[in-house]
C-alpha cells in the first residue's frame, strides 16, 4: 500500500446543516494545523447557502486559539517546520495576488519565533490557483461556490489527487449517490478527517494519492 497525500475536497450541498458543516470544515482544515493527509484542503459550497456557511466558518475560525511552547490551552499548534510554513505562505500569497480574499488569517503569527501560521479562510478562489490544486498541508481553507451537484462533483474530481473527500447533506441517499461519483479512496458523508484512524474504515488513495488499501474490507482482503 502506498499513500502519497491529497487535495481533499469537501462538498456542502444546499440542504446541509450549516452549523454542523461549518464546524466540520474548521475541524477538517485546521486540526493538527492542517498537517494531515486527510485534511480538508478545498471546500465547495452551494451558492444558495454560501454566505451563511462562510460566515459560520469565519466565526468558528476566529474562536481558535493558537498556543506556543508549554501552553496546552490552545486549539492549534505550530507548523512542522519553517520550510513548510513558507510553502503555505507561498500558496496564500499567490492566491491573494490572483484575486482571492483572506477573511481571517493569511500570514504567520507576528513576534513568534516558531513556525506558527494563522488559520486562514480564503474566498474568491478558483482552480487557476495553487491553493486549489497543489497540496498545501497547512491551516488554510479555500472556499469556492457551485451551482449544481454535477458541477460540485466535476470540481471535486478536477485534481491529480484522490485520497479522501466528504459530502455534507441532509439527505443520506443523495450524499451516497454523489459519493460514488467522486474519485477518492474514501468518501465520507457528513464527516471528515477521521477514517485513517479507525481500522474498520478504508484507507488509501487513487490517482496520484497512491494505490492499495489498508483497513476496512479491502485492506483485509489485501492481506
Image (cartoon, rainbow, N blue to C red):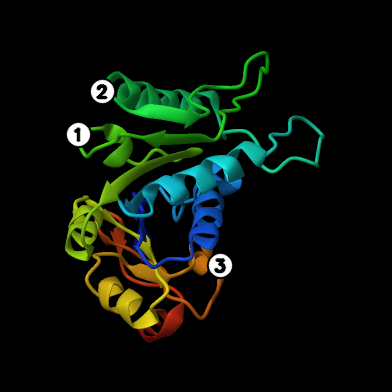
**Pointer 1 and pointer 2: residues touching (CB < 8 Å)?**
yes
* 81 left or right of 127 in image: right
Regarding residue 14, the answer to whether it shows in the image is yes
Which label's residue is closer to the chain start, 3 or 1?
1
Rate crowding at label 2 as few (under 14), some (14 to 19) or many (20 or more) other CA atoms within 10 Å.
Answer: some
Residue 38 position in % (x across, y down): 45, 56
* 173 left or right of 26 in image: left
- Could you say which is closer to the camera, residue 132 or residue 99? 99
Residue depicted at 22% across the width and 71% down the height: 181
Q: Which mark is residue 128?
A: 1
Which label's residue is closer to the chain start, 1 or 2?
2
- For the residue labelled by badge 2, is the local secondary structure a helix, a strand or a loop? loop
Q: Give the distance between the C-alpha atoms of the residues marked 2 and 3, in whole angstroms.
A: 37 Å
- Could you say which is closer to the camera, residue 219 or residue 11? 11
Please identify the quarter of the rendering in which residue 173 is found: bottom left
Residue depicted at 44% across the width and 81% down the height: 216
Residue depicted at 54% across the width and 62% down the height: 20
- Could you say which is closer to the camera, residue 17 or residue 1? 17
Say which quadrant the C terminus sits in: bottom left
Q: Which mark is residue 45?
A: none
- For the residue labelled by badge 3, is the local secondary structure a helix, a strand or a loop? helix
Location of mark 2 (residue): 98
Amino acid at each position: 500500500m502506498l499513500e502519497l497525500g491529497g487535495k481533499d475536497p469537501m462538498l456542502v450541498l444546499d440542504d446541509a446543516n450549516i452549523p454542523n458543516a461549518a464546524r466540520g470544515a474548521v475541524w477538517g482544515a485546521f486540526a493538527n494545523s492542517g498537517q494531515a493527509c486527510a485534511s480538508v484542503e478545498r471546500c465547495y459550497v452551494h451558492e444558495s447557502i454560501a454566505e451563511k456557511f462562510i460566515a459560520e466558518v469565519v466565526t468558528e475560525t476566529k474562536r481558535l486559539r493558537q498556543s506556543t511552547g508549554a501552553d496546552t490551552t490552545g486549539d492549534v499548534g505550530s507548523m512542522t517546520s519553517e520550510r513548510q510554513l513558507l510553502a503555505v505562505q507561498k500558496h496564500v500569497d499567490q492566491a491573494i495576488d490572483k484575486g482571492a480574499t483572506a477573511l481571517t488569517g493569511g500570514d504567520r503569527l507576528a513576534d513568534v519565533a516558531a513556525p506558527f501560521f494563522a488559520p486562514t479562510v480564503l474566498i474568491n478562489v478558483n482552480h487557476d490557483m495553487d491553493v486549489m490544486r497543489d497540496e498545501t498541508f497547512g491551516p488554510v481553507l479555500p472556499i469556492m461556490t457551485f451551482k449544481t451537484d454535477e458541477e460540485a462533483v466535476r470540481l471535486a474530481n478536477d485534481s491529480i489527487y484522490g485520497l479522501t473527500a466528504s459530502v455534507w447533506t441532509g439527505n443520506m441517499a443523495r450524499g451516497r449517490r454523489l459519493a460514488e461519483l467522486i474519485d477518492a479512496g474514501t468518501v465520507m458523508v457528513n464527516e471528515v478527517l477521521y477514517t485513517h484512524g479507525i481500522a474498520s474504515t478504508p484507507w488509501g488513495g487513487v490517482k496520484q494519492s497512491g494505490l492499495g488499501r489498508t483497513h476496512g474490507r479491502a485492506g483485509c482482503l489485501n492481506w
